[in-house]
Amino acid sequence: MNRDTVQDRADGAGEYEHFLRAVRDELGPVGIIEGVLADRAALAVWKLREATTDGRLGEMPLDRRVDRMLRDALEIFNERKAERESSESPPPPAPPTPPPGRFTYDEAISTTSPVIHGTWVTVDEVIDRGLDGHSRAEILREFPELTPEDVDACLAHADEIGHRPEG
């Protein structure tokens, strides 16, 4: 292979890399599978371009062939995007805000439940006791630092979020 042939191939590789980047930018593949599909679509279009340039294909103009191939690839990507978007579930609704002043958030005690102000007792602990069938009196015996109003506020919060304690 002579020096000019090597240089021509290097120039062609640079052109292909530029073309590949442009196709990837246009299709916007997400993930490995779509990346491979984009690369294969680009390679097919590139080979078609080379075949047309060499005169091996002559019936359909290059622009129409390239347009058709890119439109087909874009259609596949749009279908996959629609499937991906339809399979994504909407984010869960935010939980109701507990009454101000009675509850607080203290990550040193719990990262998942508000805490009854001035105690180490979480709202979830009181709600769980109610769901387990404990009466208000039993909950107050188990957590003597709570007031009857604290227990009522926790159980009212449980009603707000859809839990129905029996006690």
Image (cartoon, helix red, strand yellow):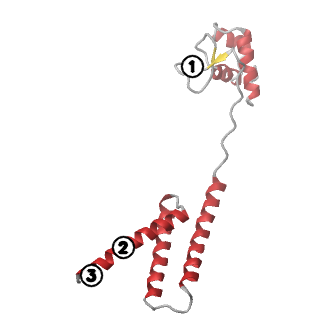
Viewer-closest of 132 and 105: 105
Is 50 left or right of 163, judged from the image as shown? left
The residue wearing badge 2 is 13
Which label sits on residue 4? Answer: 3
Measured Cα–Cα span from mark 2 to mark 1: 59 Å
**Vertical position of residue 118 compared to residue 164: above or below:** above
- Amino acid type shown at disc 1: Asp
Mark 2, secondary structure of its residue: helix
Viewer-closest of 4 and 164: 4
Is 144 left or right of 29, judged from the image as shown? right
- Amino acid type shown at disc 3: Asp
| Picture coordinates of residue 27, whole percent (x, y) | 55, 65
Viewer-closest of 134 and 76: 76
**Vertical position of residue 103 compared to residue 162: above or below:** above
Please rate how many residues cluster around mark 1, counting C-alpha atoms within 10 Å: few if below 14, some from 14 to 19, many from 20: some
**Vertical position of residue 99 compared to residue 89: above or below:** above
Locate the N terminus by quadrant.
bottom left
- Tell which tag, 2 or 1, sits nearer the viewer: 2
The residue wearing badge 1 is 106
Measured Cα–Cα span from mark 2 to mark 3: 14 Å
Please tell me which residue is depicted at 71% across the width and 14% down the height of the picture.
151
User: Residue 113 occupies which quadrant of the picture?
Assistant: top right
- Tell which tag, 3 or 1, sits nearer the viewer: 3
Viewer-closest of 27 and 127: 27
